[in-house]
Image: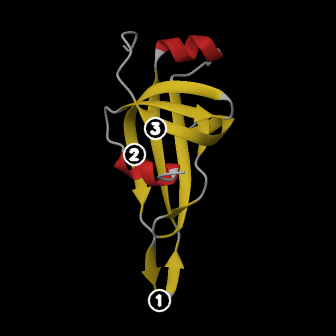
Amino acid sequence: MGEQIGEKLPTLERGDSVVITAGENKYEGTVIKKKRKKCELNMGFMEAGSISVYFELCNKTIKRHDISTKLLVISATEEVPYNWSVPQASIFSPSGDETTNHLGKVTALERSQKSPDYV
């Protein structure tokens, strides 16, 4: 099946244009921020790591899905090095610093060319 989606998340950089498939829908956006906590061995126990990648959605995606905010976040847990849980996508509300609408499991993640409707 190729590279796991979780393995792709740490390789994304700010400004990357990405098409995300979550549930049965596609969302197009640009990476604006990434938070990563690496899993590490601590006193003989493996502490889980995590990653959250934040995207600003393009206008076309916002209109198509009737979304009230421009932000989407993909989150995954790394139980042991390079072994990721299935990433989950959610709409993100910066005012409450929380996810507001769970979109489902991320089934595909591909870099793309920027659409002309980005602001």
Question: Residue 82 at x, y = what percent?
Answer: 46, 65
How many neighbours does mark 1 have within 10 angstroms: few (below 14), some (14-19), or many (20 or more)?
few
Spatial CA span between label 2 and label 3: 6 Å
Circle 2 is placed at which residue position? 34
Circle 3 is placed at which residue position? 54
Residue 18 placement: quadrant: top left
The dot on residue 11 is: none
Q: Secondary structure at mark 2?
A: strand
54 left or right, relative to 67: left
The dot on residue 43 is: 1
- Residue at x 41% of width, y 56% of height: 36
User: Mark 2 and mark 1 in contact (Cβ < 8 Å)?
Assistant: no
Q: Amino acid at mark 3?
A: Tyr
Q: Secondary structure at mark 1?
A: loop
Q: Secondary structure at mark 3?
A: strand
Q: Sequence-wise, which precedes: disc 3 or disc 1?
A: 1
How many neighbours does mark 2 have within 10 angstroms: few (below 14), some (14-19), or many (20 or more)?
some
